Amino acid sequence: MAVFFKDEVWAKGGAQVCLPCHKKGGDAEDSKLVLRDPRQFTGAAQDEAMRHNRDALARLARAKEGDKSRLLVKVTGGLDHGGADVLKPESKGHLILAEFVRRLDAPPASAPRVA
C-alpha cells in the first residue's frame, strides 16, 4: 500500500491537486484534511510526512457518505468542497483514488501456511 500511495496517489494527484490547499497556510488549512509536504523534509521525517498524508487520506477514504467513500464523493463535487469539483468521475486521478479506496477496503491477504 505504501508504494502504491507514494507512486500513484501522491505522485499523480495528491502533491499537485490536494497539497496546495490542504496544508498549513493553504486555503483549506482549517479543514479536517491538512497534509504535509514531504519535499520539506529529509530522511525519517520525510517518510513520516508521507505516512501522515497516507493516513489522513485513508481516514477520509474509509469514511462513508451513504455507501460511497467520502473522499471520492468530495473530490467529484458530491459534497461541499471549497475547491469545487477537483476531479471528473472516471478521470485518471479519480480512478487512482478509487483504486486506493478499493485497496483500503480489501480484506488483507492471509499469510501462507508453513508446513
Image (tube, rainbow, N blue to C red):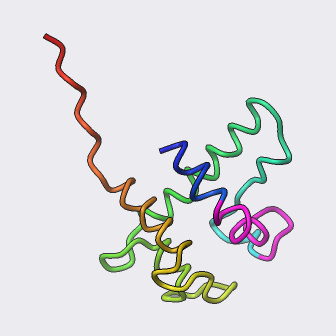
| Residue 78 is a magenta residue | no
Q: Is residue 21 left or right of residue 2?
A: right
Residue depicted at 73% across the width and 67% down the height? 16
The C terminus lies in quadrant: top left
Q: Residue furthest left?
A: 115
* Quadrant assignment, res 23: bottom right
Q: Is residue 53 above or below residue 72?
A: above
Q: Residue furthest front?
A: 92
Q: How many marks?
A: 0
Q: At x 82% / y 70%, what residue is drawn?
A: 26
In x, y percent, where is residue 57? 55, 59
Report the side of 58 relative to 62 (left or right): right
Q: Nearer the viewer, residue 81 or 92?
A: 92
Vertical comparison of 76 with 31: above or below: below
Q: Residue at x 49, y 66 (%)?
A: 97
In the image, taking residue 11 as reference, residue 8 lies left or right, namely left
| Snapshot quadrant of residue 51 | top right
As drawn, 12 above or below 48? below
**Which of the 4 image quadrants contains residue 82?**
bottom right
Q: How far from the left and from the top, in percent, is residue 63?
A: 42, 66
Residue 114 at x, y percent in the picture: 18, 14
Which of the pair 77/88 is nearer the observer?
A: 88
Picture coordinates of residue 40, whole percent (x, y):
86, 47
Q: Is residue 17 magenta?
A: yes
Relative to 112, is 103 above or below?
below
The residues colored magenta run 12-27
Extreme top residue here? 115
